[in-house]
Image (cartoon, rainbow, N blue to C red):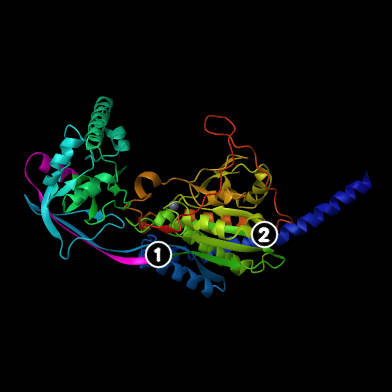
Amino acid sequence: MKKHFFLGLGLLLLFGIQTQAQDQVIENIIQEARENSHLKTLGHELMDGIGPRLVGSPQMQKAHAWAVENYQNWGIEARNEQWGEWRGWDRGITHIDMVEPWVRSLAGTQLAWSPSSPKGGAKGEVILLPDLADSAAFQAWLPNAKGKYVMISAPQLTGRPDYNWEEWATEESFEKMKAERAAFEEAWTNRVQKTGLGRRELPAALENAGALGIITSYWSRGFGANKIFSAYTKKVPTVDLSLEDYGMLFRLAESGKKPVINLNAQSTETGVVPTFNTIAEIKGSEKPDEYVMLSAHFDSWDGGTGATDNGTGTIMMMEVMRILKKVYPNPKRTILVGHWGSEEQGLNGSRAFVEDHPEMMDKIQALFNQDNGTGRVANVSGQGFVDSYEYLGRWMNQVPREITKDIQTTFPGNPGGGGSDYASFVAAGVPAFSLSSLSWSYFNYTWHTNLDTYDKIVFDDVQNNVIMAAIMVYMACEEPELVSREVRVPVGRNGEPTTWPVKRSPTRKGGMD
Ligand SMILES: [Zn+2]
């Protein structure tokens, strides 16, 4: 009995000493993250200094060079790995002025990869997509589009988001508005369907008929927020107008007041350009051929500056690497970060990395991806890995309680769909996890919108994510063996067993049609 007691105490002491040594690294991580944060400088340089990072744009290439330079300044090995080619495009100014029936400069954005206006812009009347009986009638009408700008989106009946109606409207008027809106949207869908043309074909038919440009408006259901994606036209510009500027032009055109705009959207085609992933690494001292990975996509849409999608994930991973290099310069395993190009067009950068480095896949201890906004981590799923609860739980336990206390965990969970780059690795059997953020109104206000800018970054939350990820990476590096990669049979949405996601190839040559 006594003997056992002493043996127990001995183990306790030994364990205690080991924990103490580990704690020092963790304490240093926390101290460096809090007292010497580089997040604001990185955020400013990336979002304000370089700007949005549309794949194929000059800013995307500048961002890759900037990341490598930062890593090298921190003594971290970094490189840009080419994985494909894309249509090169350089955004210019978008000036949209209503000149009839009165003068007002309108708020709008040329869509990505949209053709340019002629030099100085082009003036023309704005007309609505007509409500005609069928596709034959539409074909007969098409010559009327010549020399005109054509509005093809449904206008919004209200510029107030639903949460604002919920707060101020009577229940009756809120219900009435929703019913009117639903009926109006249905009527507009019918109007478009009766042209007989799809989403891509309609703009093409209009430009081929001689339209000066296409005007759309894709409200994101938040005050002032519009989503900005890519154009389907090949000869004339497509611009997205803000909700109310679109609404005003629409009402003027509908009531026969013949509004006229001058649209000057300048952009430059820059040919076919190479596309990259930025990879940086801190070599492992004991097991250099085993990896712990950090992951965040580097590209963005370009309506704003890609601050929360995924500037925050990007600067978070850079800051984690900077801190680890400083306080944990000789990790047991190699720490590798992937800043992926072209996530937005289908996880292309990360899929290419998985495809190009097959020998690495069963040597990756774990991967942590972040890609849904600026918020502190709120959800972690085991992605279907049977033992994820055991090791992720242990690693998370080392993160300060004030950072992890509100995190919801799901173990073992199911392999996530194609939401972001971790999915490319999960499909290859790698224990890859999403550090999923609190929303901060992500879907309405910043996700792929004109409002995704520096001012929306919540630096305190990003800093907490830095601390959490750095500690998780440190724990995964120190783990004696590679963790189990056993997977469960995933459960589909209907509750039936389903199959593990399959690896998919990237689009290596994009945007050129
Ligand atoms: Zn994203």
Numbered mark located on residue 60 in the image:
1
The image quadrant that residue 471 belongs to is bottom right
Tag 1's secondary structure?
A: helix
In which quadrant of the rendered image does the C terminus lie? bottom left
In this rendering, the answer to whether 188 lies above or below 326 is above
Residue 382 in magenta stretch: no
Residue at (46% x, 58% y) in the render:
508
Residue at (20% x, 48% y) in the render:
206
In this rendering, the answer to whether 469 lies above or below 36 is above
Residue 269 in magenta stretch: yes
Label 1 Cα neighbours within 10 Å, binned few <14 / some 14-19 / many ≥20: many
Numbered mark located on residue 477 in the image:
2
Q: Which residues are magenta?
A: 247-272
x and y percentages locating residue 213 in the rendered image = 19, 53
x and y percentages locating residue 62 in the rendered image = 40, 69
Tag 2's secondary structure?
A: helix
Q: Residue furthest top?
A: 172
Q: Is residue 88 left or right of residue 33?
A: left
Q: Nearer the viewer, residue 166 or 451?
A: 451
The image quadrant that residue 97 belongs to is bottom left
Asked whether mark 1 and ligand 1 are closer than 8 Å, the reply comes as no
x and y percentages locating residue 510 in the rendered image = 40, 57
The three-letter amino acid code for the residue at tag 2 is Cys
The three-letter amino acid code for the residue at tag 1 is Met
